[in-house]
Image: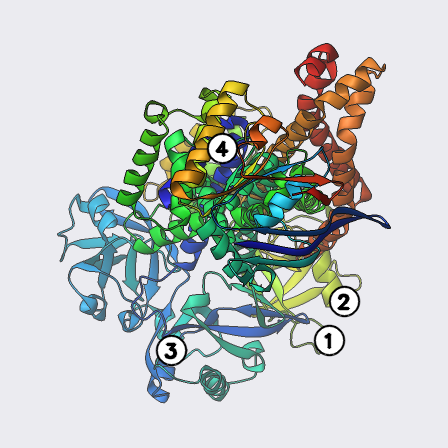
Amino acid sequence: MIRNFFVIAWRNITKNKIFSFINIAGLGIGMACTIMIFLWVQYEKSWNKTQKNYDQVFEGFSTRNFNGELSTGSDLMFPLPKAAKENFPEVEGSTLVSYGENTLFTVNDKKIKRPTIHVTNDFFDVFTYEFIHGDESAIKEPNGIVVTESTARALFNNTDVIGKIVELNRYRSVTIRAVVKDVPPSSTLLFDAIVPFDASSDWVKQSLTDWVNCNNRAFFKVKKGTSIASLEQKLLTLIKKSSPAENPTTRGGLLLQPMSKWRLYEEFRNGKNTGGRIQYVNLFSWIAIIILIIACVNFMNLSTARSEKRAREVGIRKTLGSEKKQLLLQFICESILVSMLAFLLAAALIYTGLPFFNRLLNQQISIPYQSPVFWLGILGIIILTGIIAGSYPAFYLSAMKPVKVLKGSFLPGKQALLPRRILVTAQFAVSIVLISATIIIYQQIRHVQNRDLGYDTNNLIMVNATGDMGKNYEIMRNSLLQSGMIEAVNTTSLPVSNIFGFTSGVRWAGAPEDPNLIIGFLGSGEHFADIMKARMLDGRDFKKGDSNCVILNKEAIRVMKLKNPVGSTINWAGRERRITGIVDDLIMTSPYALPIPLMLAYDPNWIGSLNIRIKRGVEVKKALQLIETIYKKYNTEYPFEYTFADTAFNEKFANEKLIGNLAFIFASLAIFICCLGLFGLVSFSIERRTKEIGIRKILGASVQSLLALMSKEFLLLVFISFAIAIPFAWWLMNTWLSNFSYRIDIGIGIFFFVGIITLLICLITVGLNAFKTATANPVKSLRTE
Amino acid sequence: MIQLQNIFKWINTGSNRVFILKDINLEISKGDFVSIMGPSGSGKSTLLNIIGMLDQASEGSYLFNQTDVYALKEKQRSQLYKENIGFVFQAYHLIDELTVYENIETPLLYHNIKQSDRQAMVADILDQFNIVGKKDLFPSQLSGGQQQLVGIARAIITKPTLLLADEPTGNLNSSQGEEIMELFRKLNEENGTTIIQVTHSEKNAAYGKRIIELLDGRIEKK
C-alpha cells in the first residue's frame, strides 16, 4: 500500500510543477538553514570535548569590586593551584597557566613566532593531549618543552625532534621533550608549544609566595561528586588566610567554572555567570526551527488551498473502503516524500554553502559523514519536517465527506481560509521581526563604529617592539620621519588598541577612602596626544626631557574627584609623579562600554609597541616597506609584526558583525520562503478568479483596480502581521541593546522603513502573478471556462 | 437485506428546514435489482447515499442484514460498508494519477489483500471486461464508456453483495449505456449481486426487477 502511496505522491509532484517547486524549494532552503545552524550549534557545544577530564576540570574566577562595579576575571595568584592540591584532598590535580603569548623560536638561523602557553609542571595532571613522541613527564624537567606536530615540522621539517634544543625569545634555551598532535581549534587552550615557567627567573621565584598579584589562570581537576560550592568557599578561605593584607581579591568572591561552560557561558555580570555565547546559540537554534516551520507552513497553505482536487480523490478512496487513518498515512507519506526531495536540495545547498558559512563564522565546521548520530539527526529532520508540514493538510483532507466532495459543486479550497490566513500572517510577522532585528543590529554597529573614540585610528600602525628597540629608537624615529612618509612616531608600553594594565595603587593628597578605585595605565614616550590625535583638555602632552609625569583622562579625573589636577602630584609605583595634562576620554577597550579611567605614565624606556602614523595620501604599501626596512636594520633579532589600529579596533565588532550577518542571511531566507508561499497562494487564488476577473474587465474594470482587487486580501494580512510584529521586535531589540552601554535608541523610522520594504516585497510578489491575469484578454478566459 | 423505516433527511438553511426525504419506508431483499427514478431534486441520490452509508438519515432506522446501521460505531460501520458495498458514479470518479490497473487495484489495498492475490484478481477482471490492453493507460486516455467500465470493475472487484450506481450511464451514449446495463444484469443474475441504480432513463430503469419512483422526497410508486 505504501508503494501505491508513493507512486501517486510522485505523480502528483511531477504533475504540479510550480507548486512542487515552491514546496521543495522552501522546505529545502529551510532544511539547509536548520542543518547548518545545528552543525554550528553542535560545533559550539563540542568545545573542549577532546579533553579526557571534561567533567572534572574547573577554572577559577575571582569577582572583584572595581570602582563600584563587580568584575569577574580568571586571573588568579601563582601559588594558589599548588596550595589547593596540597590542602584539599578533593582536588586531584591543579595547574597554573599563562594567558598565552607569542614566543620567538630560534633554531640556528630559523626564526618563527608561535603562540605558546606557560604552565606549571603539573599541567598534564589536569589537561590531556595525544602524544606522538615523549610523554607527560616532558615538562617535569626545568627546561623541557612540549611542541605540537606542526611546530615541530615548521622548525625541523619532521616530528621526531626529541632532544632538540630551541632558543625562546633569544634568552632561554630549552629542549623539546615531547611532541603532541595539533590542538583542535575548538579548544579553550590553544597553543603551538607548552613551556614550563622558568623556575630560575626572579619573577617566578618571587611569584611562588606572591598571593596578591594575579596574572595567570588556575585550573583544578576535582574528584567526581565533590561539592563545588564548598570547594569555592575553601579556596577563598585559603586565599584570605595566605594573603598578607586585604585586597580586592580577598574581599571578592571565588567561582569555579566547569569546562562544559568555558565556551558558551563566558559572560559575567555583577559577579554572576549570566551566559554569553549560549544566548546566540539558543537564539539561532530557534531561528533555525522557525525558518523550517515557515517552510512547513508554505506546504500546509498550498496543500489546503489546492485541496479541491485532492478532496475528490479522498472521496473516491473513502467509497472504495479507505479508513481515515489510511488516508492520513497516505498524505503523511506524500509530505515525507516531498521532504526527502527537499533534503536532496538542502544537501546540495549545504555542500556549496558550508565553506561560505565557515568563512563567515571564522570557524571550521565540517560535515560529520562518519557520525551515525548525524545521519539519525538528518533522518529525524526529514521525517519530522514531513510530519509537521503534512499533518495539518492530512487531517484536513482526510476529514472530507465523500458525499459533499463527489457532487462536484463543492469548493473545499474555500474552507480553511481562516487558518490559512492566520498562518500567512504568522509567517510575515516572523519575517518582519527578523528584518527589524537585522536593521537594528546594523544600525547599532554603525553607531558604535562612528563613535568619537577620542583619537584617530586611521593610518596608525602598531609595530611589536621588543629587543633592541630602546637603544635604537631615536635613530629609527629620525629615519622614519626623514622619509617624508611618516607623520609621527611614538612608543607605548603596550599596543594602544586595548588597556591591559590596571592598578589600585594610585595615591594622592586628599584621596578618598575608596579601596576599590581601579585605574587603567599605559606607559608612553613623548608626543602621545600628538600621534594619537587625541584632544588635550588641559595642560600639555609629554615632551622630551620629562620625568615622572602622568597624563590622566577625563574619566580618571572624574572618578578621582580631582580639582585643579594639572600641576598637582600623585604617587604610583613608589614614585611621585606630576600631572602634566588631561586628555579627553579614549575608547580603547570595548567600543560599547563607557570610557575607562586611564593614566598615561611617561617612560621612554618602557617599550612594547612602536606607534607610527603614516601621512595622509601616502601609499600604505610603500610606507610599510619602508618601515620594515628600517625596522629590520635596527632589530635583527625579531621578525617585523604590525597591526593597523583601525583593523584592531574593527575586530572588536567581530561578534556583533557576525550576529548582524547571520541575522541578515536568515532574515532574507525567511522572507524569501514567505514570498514563495505567498506567490503560490496568490497564483492559486488568481487561477480560481480568472472568470471573475474576465467578467469585471468586460464590465469596464481598469488594470489598476484589478491589481488592487487581487492584492487587497494579502496586503491586509501583511498589515496585520506588521501590527503584531512591531511591538515584539521593539521589545526584543531593546533587550538586546541593553547589553551595551553605548547604544542607539530605536526610532519609529526603522519600523516605518521595514513596513515599506515588506509591503513592497509583497506587492511585487502579488504583482508578478496578478499583472498577467489583469492584462489578459477577458474573451479568452471566459471562453475557456 | 435492506430495511429502511421512517427515514427523514433534512438540511437547515438559516431558520428554514428543507426536507429532502420524507418518511421513506423501503425493503430490498438479497438478489434484487432496483431502479430508483424521479425528477431532479427528488432525493434519489440522497436516498442512494443513505443506503450506501455515505450519508446519514436525520431520522429513522436502517437495518442492513439485520444490523442496525445507526447503532454501529464509525469503525464497525465502515467495516460493514467495506465488506458489502461497491459504488459506481455518473462521473466515473477514477483517480487521475493512477493507471487503470492501479485504479482497480486500490480497493484491494484497503481490503488488505496480498500482492500476489491482487495481481490475479485484477488480471481476472481486466480479462472479464476485455480491457487488458488498457491496463497501463491513465483515465484521461480512455473514452467515457471505457472509464465507466473501469469504474464498475473497481466497484465489483471486492465482490460486494450490494452494488450502488448513481446514474452510471448518465454521461454515456446509448450503445455504451446498453453495454453497462447488460453488464449489470449479468452481475445480478449470474453472481447474485444486489443492485440499486439511480437513473433518469426509462429504458435503463427497465433493466431492474423493480422500479421505485420518488417525487419531492416521497416514494410515489413501488
Location of mark 1 (residue): A512
Quadrant of res A274: bottom right
Residue A631, given in percent of the width and then of the height, sits at 41, 37
Tag 1 subunit:
A
- The residues bearing labels 4 and 3 have C-alpha atoms spaced at a distance of 81 Å
Cβ atoms under marks 2 and 1 closer than 8 Å? yes
Q: Amino acid at mark 2?
A: Lys
| Mark sitting on residue A224 | none
Chain identifier of the residue bearing label 4 in the image: B
Subunit that carries the residue with mark 3 = A
* Residue that mark 4 sits on: B94
Q: CA distance from mark 2 to mark 4?
A: 92 Å
Which subunit holds the residue at mark 2? A
Q: Is residue A569 left or right of residue B139?
A: right
Is B20 above or below relative to A43? above
Label 4 vs label 1, nearer the camera: 4
> Comparing marks 3 and 2, which lies closer to the viewer?
3
Q: Give whichever of B26, A388 is nearer the camera.
A: B26
Q: Which residue is mark 2?
A: A561
Specify whether A641 is left or right of B2.
left
Q: Which residue is mark 3?
A: A81
Residue A152 lies, in percent from the top left, at 21, 49
> Marks 3 and 1: CB-CB under 8 Å?
no
Q: Residues within 10 Å of mark 2 (few under 14, many from 20)?
A: few
In front: mark 2 or mark 4?
4
The secondary structure type at the circle numbered 2 is loop
- Say which amino acid is labelled 4: Leu
Q: How far across and how far down the image is residue A664, in percent?
A: 59, 39
Disc 3 vs disc 1: which is toward the camera? 3
Mark 2 or mark 1: which comes first in sequence? 1
Secondary structure under tag 1 reads loop
**Dot 4 lies on which element?**
loop
